[in-house]
Amino acid sequence: MTSRVRWMTAVYATVDFRTGENRTHIGVPKSGKDDLEEMLHDVGGNDGPVALYVPESAPERTPREWRGKVVGLARASRLPRGKNIHDYGYPDLDGSIRWPIGFPCELVCRPDEKACPTLREIVESCGTPNNFRYHTKRLHLGSLGLDAFMEDALGEHFKSVCDLESLTGAGVASRDQARGGVRV
């Protein structure tokens, strides 16, 4: 069974700019709390990778070739015992906690940036009734549950660069999944 990409969240990069390491958690603004909790209930620790989108308006430190693109997939992990979403806030580039709630994750697919689709192209080509502005506005507020049109379009794209079948179920993925992309 192939895993479906049912959620998307905005990030500046697939790596932590402070450490250079793959990201281990993702933060969202307080306004995204309800969507974050719904997403974690839906995919946390199970199946269904979360698509990572880099906004067109990302800061200068974000490489230009990543901006506006869906740059990878992460697996949302279950919250460890004794931890909650407030333990996974994510700092902005200046060190302030701009995204005060979040979730642990494992980066499972990071294709070469040339293989990453722009969100605008995906939205315009898939037939979703929601326009590009709707998607970017919702992503500014927190994680976004995707409609079937977006799920299908992202699934089609990422199955060509990642092994989506190996992302299904709790026995999850090796760190070597990005077929034709950067190994994570």
Image (spheres, rainbow, N blue to C red):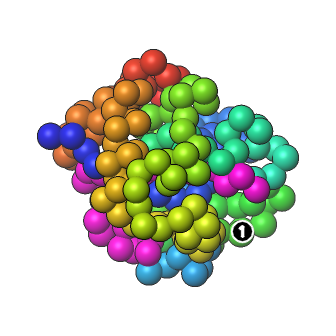
Residue 46 appears left or right of 35? left
Residue 41 magenta: yes
Q: Amino acid at mark 1?
A: Ile
Q: Is residue 53 above or below residue 148?
A: above
Residue 81 placed where, x, y %? 34, 66
Residue 71 placed where, x, y %? 56, 40
Q: Residue at image x 45%, y 18%?
A: 180
Q: Can you identify the residue that label 1 sits on?
A: 97
* Residue 121 seen in the current view: yes
Residue 29 appears left or right of 33? right
Q: Residue at image x 78%, y 66%?
A: 96
Q: Is residue 105 above or below residue 21?
A: below
Q: Residue at image x 82%, y 44%?
A: 61
Residue 132 placed where, x, y %? 57, 61
Q: Is residue 33 above or below residue 142?
A: below
Which image quarter holds the N terminus?
top left
Where does the magenta region start and end?
35-57
Q: Is residue 103 above or below residue 167?
A: below
Residue 69 magenta: no
* Residue 102 seen in the current view: no
Q: Residue at image x 77%, y 39%?
A: 64
